[in-house]
Amino acid sequence: MYFTTSIAIAAGACLAYGAFYLFVGLRRVADRRRHLLFGFFALAYAGAVLLARRAFLSTSPEHALPPIRASLVFTVVGFALLAWYVAEFTGVRPRRFLWTVTGGLASIGLAAVAFPDLLGSRVESAVQTLPWNETILAWDLSGSPLFVALLAAQAATIGYVIAADVILLRRGHRSESLGLLVGLAWFAATIIQEQVVQLAGLDFVVLSDFGFAGFVVAMALEEGRRGIEVEQSLLAYKAQLETEIRARTIDLETAQAELLAQERDRAVTEERNRIARELHDAVTQLLFSINLIAGSLPALVRRDPETAERTVGELQRLTRGALAEMRTLLRELRPHTIANTELPTLVGQLTDGLGARHDIPVDLTLELAASLPPAVHLAVYRIAQEALNNVAKHANASRLEVALTGDDHHVHLSVADDGSGFDPSDVSGHHMGLDIMQERAMDIGGEVVVVSNPNAGTTVELSWEANSHV
């Protein structure tokens, strides 16, 4: 039983490799088509080998015919898959030739199934005793036209594989070419030996079944070697990619640091320019007015004491306003002092500066006795500052009412003027300060309500409750 046992082992090897590469092809995207073709090719020849073994073990030609016919079908399928697999393996894809060979092999298989007499009536079989006294049923298909067609298709396929291997070698793929050559040499040698035995009528066992297994094993080893090379290449590429990523990360961090430094310098420059504008627009004008009034005051005292007394009051108002503006600008230069100054003091200085700069009477109510969270403290101050800036820039008001009331649990700020007002439903770009106030209020869980009508003044109210998220 050595011969038939060896055939079973060869079929088992084909089955194992076929199942493995089918699994690899289904699990991995890379080279999926090649792996699937190789897996199906190995399984097809495993089926052909197992059916041939069954025919060898048959007790009569009648019992041998069905497995012979089925083995022939698996053989033509295997040869077709072999041609397409080699096309994927080598990259040599003469599609017209491949489809022609595939069509011819398919026709042979269909003829074997559809016309069993075409094969059965031409098969000659005889009991053969091998040198080690193992008895098998040997058969000869040389009298069948299907055998001639199969021989031609096999010769064409093997010729294509040889040509593809030569092209692969010329392209510089020596390792792949050698692997294919080893498998092909063993396969071709056993195929030729089988044909010589059948055509010459030699009394010797055919070895093509072992050629199937030899080719599968050789190509499986080559696929494994190629897979190892791919994995090594991927690991090397991964290491190179990680190195490049680290280098790019360092470059990005350096660029980010430079951009942050540039942005910081730009912000400092813009803030300096803003403070310079404030000094020019507010404090400088107030000091210029104070200087004019102070210069004319001695003569006015001698000429009209009562008017001089009123002018002194005006001088005091302007001086108080200039002092308030200077304190506000100094706090802007050192923002941490805003958090350390009580809100009523901050709002009072803002209103003093506005009233002095624009000569607007201010009705001020400051009744806030609270220790507010820093975020709320800053937000209330900025909203009051923005509301008063809007009055100064847009309102053309003749009177202003500002009220800041509340305690630790509630704050209410109101800024109301009798100026020109506007239509809240038609807010244009120059009123973007309203959006800023709304955003600041939302950040602390508060609410800003703006009530205004054309020629009817504007009221801005901020409400904050301690149960908010700040």
Image (cartoon, rainbow, N blue to C red):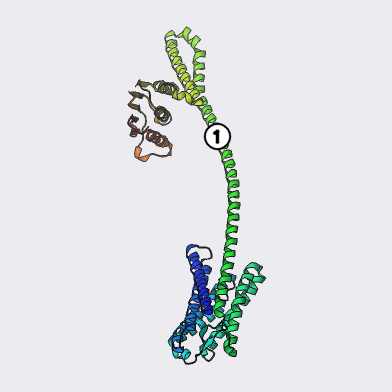
- Where 304 falls versus 348 (above or below)? above
User: In the image, what residue occupies the spot 61% across and 74% down?
Assistant: 164
Which residue is disc 1 drawn over? 264
Out of 170 and 122, give the one closest to the viewer. Answer: 122
Out of 298 and 390, give the one closest to the viewer. Answer: 390
Q: Position of residue 397 (x, y in %)?
A: 38, 27
Disc 1 residue type? Arg
- Camera sees residue 84: yes
Q: Position of residue 17 (x, y in %)?
A: 52, 69
- Where 238 falls versus 457 (above or below)? below
- Where 22 falls versus 378 (above or below)? below
Lateral position of residue 331 relative to residue 384, left or right? right
Lateral position of residue 178 relative to residue 145, left or right? right
Local crowd size for mark 1, using a 10 Å CA cut-off: few (<14), some (14–19), many (≥20): few
User: In the image, what residue occupies the spot 44% across and 25% down?
Assistant: 339
- Camera sees residue 96: no
Q: Quadrant of residue 444?
A: top left
Task: State the SS at label 1.
Answer: helix
- Where 201 falls versus 103 (above or below)? below
Q: Position of residue 386 (x, y in %)?
A: 42, 30
User: In the image, what residue occupies the spot 58% across and 48% down?
Assistant: 245
